[in-house]
Amino acid sequence: MVRLAGRNGLLGGALGMALLAATSLSAQDKPITYPETRRGDVVDTLFGEKIADPYRWLEADVRHDADVADWVSRQSTFTETYLKSLPQRAWFQKRISTLTDFERFGLPQKAGKRYFYTRNSGLQNQSQLFVRDGLTGTPRLLLDPNAWAKDGATALDSWEPSDKGRYLLYSVQDGGSDWRILHVLDVDTGKVTSDELRWVKFSGLSWIGEEGFLYSRFPAPKEGETFQSRNYNQGIYYHRIGTPQSADELVYATPDHPEYGHTARVTQDGRLAIIASTIGTDARNDIHVIDLAARKTKGWQAVPIVTGFKDDWSLVEGAGQRLWFVTNQNAPRYRLVSIDLAQKAPAFAEVVPQREDILERAGVIGSNLVLNYMRDASSHAEILSLDGKTARSLALSGIGTASGFHGKPGDPETFYSFSSFNRPASIFRLDMRTGKSEVFAEPKMDFSPDDIVVEQRFYPSKDGTRIPMFLVRRKDVAASGKPVPTLLYGYGGFDIALTPGYSPTTMAWVQAGGAYAMANLRGGGEYGREWHDAGRRANKQNVFDDFIAAGEYLKEQGIAAKDGLAIQGRSNGGLLIGAVTNQRPDLFAAAVPQVGVMDMLRFDRFTAGRYWVDDYGYPDREADFKVLRAYSPYHNIHDGAAYPAILVTTADTDDRVVPGHSFKYAAALQHASLGDKPHLIRIDTRAGHGSGKPTDKLIEENADVLAFMAQWTGLKPASE
């Protein structure tokens, strides 16, 4: 493992002093002399066009390539020198830390008479896992991930108690990687068993009684390819407690279709295992069912009930031979259906038809259904009988996001959370018999939510499509009517909806006097299948048009200052920021593309990238290539244009969007003549695509990002 210079690395001696002198860069210095980056002579001919790729060498894994490690070290030193010079940074670091420092809980999960939940006292790097015997029992600490690694970068990922709560199955994430290691804890004794399972990724965790569980894994990658090789041949396995992984039984796999992915879930009564198979990121899956009572005589016999990969089928729950699903079959905004497998010719019956609102998820709790709907990217919920009748609404506190509503048929108890931009998540316990909600955990903050105004506005895109956008400001800032530095965030892809939620970073920006806007672009899941289709593959330009129109609207309405608009996005949102910066560099003062997909001609060659062809298209197909070539951030930088200030962020262990995307893009930015503003890259160590990142690293990164954007938009906190 290379030790990188930078905030989390080492810099010292004569070499360190020489680098600092050679790259001396304060917020006002110009012109900028960046660290030297070698240009190669790689040229590909694709569909008759010669495509230069001078930074192909930066795709190599930083852990195994000395040249890439050296480049990363020099870039990290250069960027850290700049970021430390920003006058607003100390204020943002202190404020983000304060806004993070509050007790918060995860949704409780009930198993037998035990309740399992996570808790963070405030600034702990990782949340701890507790159990209570009974709802009012004394909390007992089961797992403390903060003791797993000195740097706090080893995290508790997912976890699942066995049916009666005797065991806890949990996955460990190290250094931000997508790979997981599974362990089992004996809840009675608090001791970890000998069970350890590796090469787990994109897996569900589902118990069969108390003796074993189902999980998904890939074959072990070749040496040196752990963080870059493409993921093929995922299978579902059964592990019996107390046995080695080599003894695990293969439950389901498709060797003739190595590109298929598979996950399993066991119904709450333990009768059936439901296998969902996918071929990419699209909401299209096949469903097979295994009768667990018959597995001793028939083995793991998987019976298909949905085939063809045409629609989305999301299991709600099962009771006996009856299953409920949320599906977009003949319903682009989703509906609820059920099937009785005990019938001679089982068929799906509609329980709740499609509505104008999007049916996000559902749960079977006690003798009721809870349906979680989304209207204009904000949540509301309804309670119905199992036949879909006698609905009653569940009161929520205005614009926000509700989640949870997990439970069991026959058990009337469930938990849910509600949050908004100005309200951290509160946890509620709901008794389905009475319809009464009680607070289980409510955070205490040092500000009043009423001092923050949350609005929803709608604006026209380039083609006239009506796009929703959330706007968050201090009450006094909104009342003044004056334009202020504004941060615009977006994503626009993979059928993912951006919904209101609390972020200490967003709140710090708003409390500093800025405005925060979040645009619900096409390509997301805010309005169902049609909305998603309108922003993917050949329609991807609609996403960029929607975002550019949001920026224009914010300025036209006097919300954003004339030279005070910053933009930010992560992952697919990083691609968005790179693309719109190329297309409208004049519109933005600062841009922060984070862990972005920047080379659209080679994204499918690494790790999970092959799944993304559903949204982006296939680079090796001419029609798709032409679309991708037209907006690929790496390939469309306009030499000679005046660009905004850009801070690219990535991490060395990102095996979702490999850091080579950001490395190549940053090198190309620094090579081009793009004006006097800085174009930097921040590279975190022992971190990945985002999940599992310790609290202290999050505070450091977000303080850097906000200080950078504040510098170039003119935002100055009143108490700075």
Image (spheres, rainbow, N blue to C red):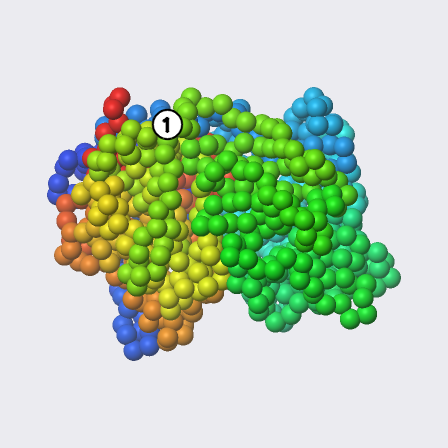
**Whether residue 478 is situated above or below residue 247 in the rendered picture:** above
Where is residue 581? Give x, y as percent. Answer: 26, 53
Q: Nearer the viewer, residue 100 or 388?
A: 388
**Whether residue 286 is situated above or below residue 467 in the rendered picture:** below
Residue 127 seen in this snapshot: no
The amino acid sitting under disc 1 is: Asp
Where is residue 93? Give x, y as percent. Answer: 35, 27
Where is residue 712? Give x, y as percent. Answer: 21, 39
State the residue at coordinates (46%, 48%): 377
State the residue at coordinates (74%, 28%): 134
Query: Quadrant location of residue 589?
Result: top left
Query: Quadrant location of residue 2?
Result: top left
Judged from the image, the secondary structure of the residue bearing numbered disc 1 is: helix
Residue at the left extreme of this rendering:
31
- Dot 1, crowdedness within 10 Å: few (<14), some or many (≥20)? few
State the residue at coordinates (51%, 39%): 692
Where is residue 399? Give x, y as percent. Answer: 46, 40
Residue at the right extreme of this rendering:
297
Residue at the front extreme of this rendering:
390
Q: Quadrant of the N terminus?
A: top left
Mark 1 lies on residue? 451
Query: Quadrant location of residue 536?
Result: bottom left
Residue at the bottom extreme of this rendering:
48
Q: How many marks?
A: 1
Q: Quadrant of the C terminus?
A: top left
Q: Nearer the viewer, residue 142 or 580?
A: 580
Q: Nearer the viewer, residue 408 or 234?
A: 408
Residue 204 seen in this snapshot: yes
State the residue at coordinates (54%, 41%): 402
**Whether residue 94 is situated above or below residue 279 in the rendered picture:** above
**For residue 393, side relative to residue 95 (left or right):** right
